[in-house]
Image (cartoon, grey):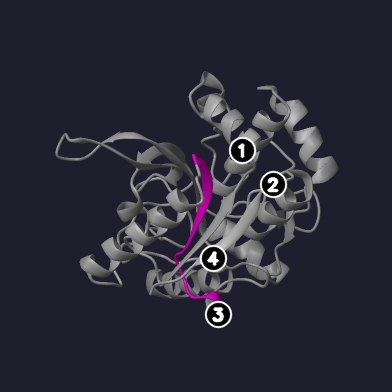
Amino acid sequence: MPKLYLRSLLLMLMAALGLHVGAAGSGSSSASSQPGKQVHFKPEQIITFAKKVEKTLAARGAHVAILARMGRPVSELPEGMHFTHVAFALYSEITTYDGRKLPGYAIYNLYQQDDHPDVSELVQDFPVDFFSDVAYMEAGIIIPSPELQMRLIEVIASPTYKALHNPHYSVIANPFTLGRQNCTEFVLDVINAAIYHTSDIKVIKANEKAFFVAQAVHVNPIKLMLGSMLSAEVSTSDQVGPPVTATFEKLGEYLLKYDAGSSMITVMPD
């Protein structure tokens, strides 16, 4: 099959899956879990919005929050999906890029590697970085109860945080299995490590299967199969039936149901 035709087919399949292929075909995208590359807004707009999100978190006394961004327009995402990347925002003394130490929020992410989109790594950055390439300025925020926040701080500062990271990435990772992981599943695993006071991933997965409701991936099975063949960041190897994945919205439903005192809000530009 001609190379150009293969690339055109890949682009169409990725669009159907709510993904995006970068100019070099590397899979670079804010639609999944990679750091910012495509800037859609002016730097001053990004800075102003990032500061608004930080002020919103601080005004609500959030020491830890779950933060989500929109890397692609909703119209390009599969049904039931709105935000495209999820991470932890942790209030602490942060060291800025120019070496200053200031109070603020550091963002704890699971990002795909640029050259290997099926491999992820844990990266810490800041709100301006987090929102640098959003397609739409809207932030989703889940603020856990004060008790769960304290437990999350302990987990994030412990070896458990890194131990829960599975570098084998899939944008539609099944949250109930161990083969693949995406950013939202990682956040869910860390949350449940805090809830159940455990680092045992088998215990965490058992409780997720019992209490967490995953989002069905509404994509044509043939397109999904071809997408997994042609794109490294799409894998169905951990799916055991109709594909499911974790989303920010499902995380919110989960915590609002089982974590008394948690809240979920959306932040928009002024």
Which quadrant of the figure has residue 163? top right
Neighbor class of circle 2 (other Cα within 10 Å; few <14, some 14-19, many 20+) is some
Please, what secondary structure does the residue beneath circle 1 have? Answer: helix
Q: Marks 3 and 2: CB-CB under 8 Å?
A: no
Task: State which region is magenta.
Answer: 63-74
Judging by the rendered image, the residue that carries numbered circle 3 is 75
Judging by the rendered image, the residue that carries numbered circle 2 is 261
Neighbor class of circle 1 (other Cα within 10 Å; few <14, some 14-19, many 20+) is some
Q: Which of the marked residues, 2 or 1, is nearer the chain's N terminus?
A: 1
Tell me residue 86's x, y (percent).
Answer: 52, 52
Amino acid type, callout 1? Pro
Separation of marks 3 and 4 at Cα, in angstroms: 18 Å
Is residue 155 rendered to the left or right of residue 242? Answer: left
Residue drawn at x 34%, y 59% as measured from the top left:
50
Q: Between 215 and 138, which is closer to the camera in this rendering?
A: 138
Q: Which of the marked residues, 2 or 4, is nearer the chain's N terminus?
A: 2
Judging by the rendered image, the residue that carries numbered circle 1 is 146
> Disc count in the image?
4
Judging by the rendered image, the residue that carries numbered circle 4 is 266
Please, what secondary structure does the residue beneath circle 2 have? Answer: loop
Which quadrant of the figure has residue 226? bottom right
Which mark's residue is nearer the viewer, 3 or 1?
1
Q: Which of the marked residues, 3 or 2, is nearer the chain's N terminus?
A: 3
Separation of marks 3 and 1 at Cα, in angstroms: 35 Å
Q: Between 262 and 240, which is closer to the camera in this rendering?
A: 262
Tell me residue 63's x, y (percent).
Answer: 49, 39
